[in-house]
Image (cartoon, rainbow, N blue to C red):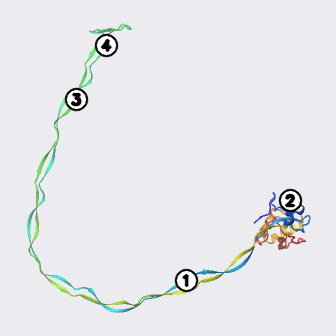
Amino acid sequence: MTRPARSTAGHPRTFTAAGLMALLPMASLAQSLPQAARPGDCFARIAQPPVFEQQTERIEVAEASERVEVTPAKYEWTEETIVVRPASERVVEVRPAEYRSVEERVMVSPASERLEEVPARFRTEAVQEQVKPATRVWKPGRGAIERVDHVSGEVLCLVEEPAVYRTVSRQVLVTPATTRRVAVPAEYQIVHRQELVRPAETRVETLPAQTETVRVRTLVRPAQERRVTVPARYENLTREVEVSPSRVDWHPVLCNTNANQQTILALQRALQRAGFDPGKIDGKLGQMTYRAVARYQRANGLPTGGITFDTLDRLGVATGRGDQA
């Protein structure tokens, strides 16, 4: 939807007839403005809402189909003799078996061998271990080999110091560790068991079958189905169809140029009575008044974009003229 142009103050931009003469080319002016426009009239581009009408259409809401009707199966009760336990035989003991107690020596663990560990044998020996090797050092004095230090005049003798030893004990292996095999004899246990002396004597008895009379549910007639055709179902649908699209045209409007204070006061009071706050009732076309007019127009399905004379007529504001669209 095309909205009216906004000025820097936030009001819809309106043009006087003289101003439009300067803005529009002469070729398009005759097509867009009413021919009866007079100097001093104000115009604004007003958005005309689309026009709808209700149309009723018959639509299919359920396709034709089939319904299945089922006739249940028919049963009847009859009596039947059934075998609940078949004929069988059983063994009856005539004389029990005879046993005697017998002692028997049973081996519970066979003869075997086990390995025993023979630990290693050691002896202790004293060993001389060198702590410091033999060395030669120079010491003051006189000896077989001498050196005179020409710097200090001191006589130095080369002395041989013997090596230093200590005695330590150590374990010397005499016999390494080994194993030996030890025979383990078999183990026996005396057990008592029952030994059959004479087997039991038996005979076979025949047991007759056991029957019972029971009520049985027998099928007389199986279940049947019947298919019934269900016709399609229709409903009337009412919907709105656009017969005239939205458009934007030039319309004469109320503005500061062609409105007086009394008309603006009447407009503000009418908006207030209709429940649309125009702000301060001061006889001036301010932002609050323009916004209240726009809300009123949208709520009542009127063209928006300026204070049209249709809006003033709907509000009951006398202007002394009609719409010159």
List the residue tagged with mark 1: 65
Q: Which mark is residue 102?
A: none
Disc 3 to disc 2, C-alpha distance: 128 Å
Q: Residue at x 81, y 70 (%)?
A: 271
Residue 127 percent coordinates (x, y): 20, 28
Mark 4 closeness class: few <14, some 14–19, many ≥20 residues within 10 Å:
few
Q: Residue at x 55, y 83 (%)?
A: 65
**Disc 2 or 1, which lies upstream in sequence?**
2
* Callout 3 amino acid: Val
Disc 1 to disc 3, C-alpha distance: 117 Å
Asked whether residue 283 appears in the rendered view, the answer is no
Total marks in image: 4
List the residue tagged with mark 4: 139
**Disc 4 or 1, which lies upstream in sequence?**
1
Camera-side residue of 161 and 226: 226
Camera-side residue of 47 and 254: 47
Residue 100 percent coordinates (x, y): 8, 72
Determine whether label 3 and label 2 are within 8 Å by CB: no
Disc 2 to disc 4, C-alpha distance: 130 Å
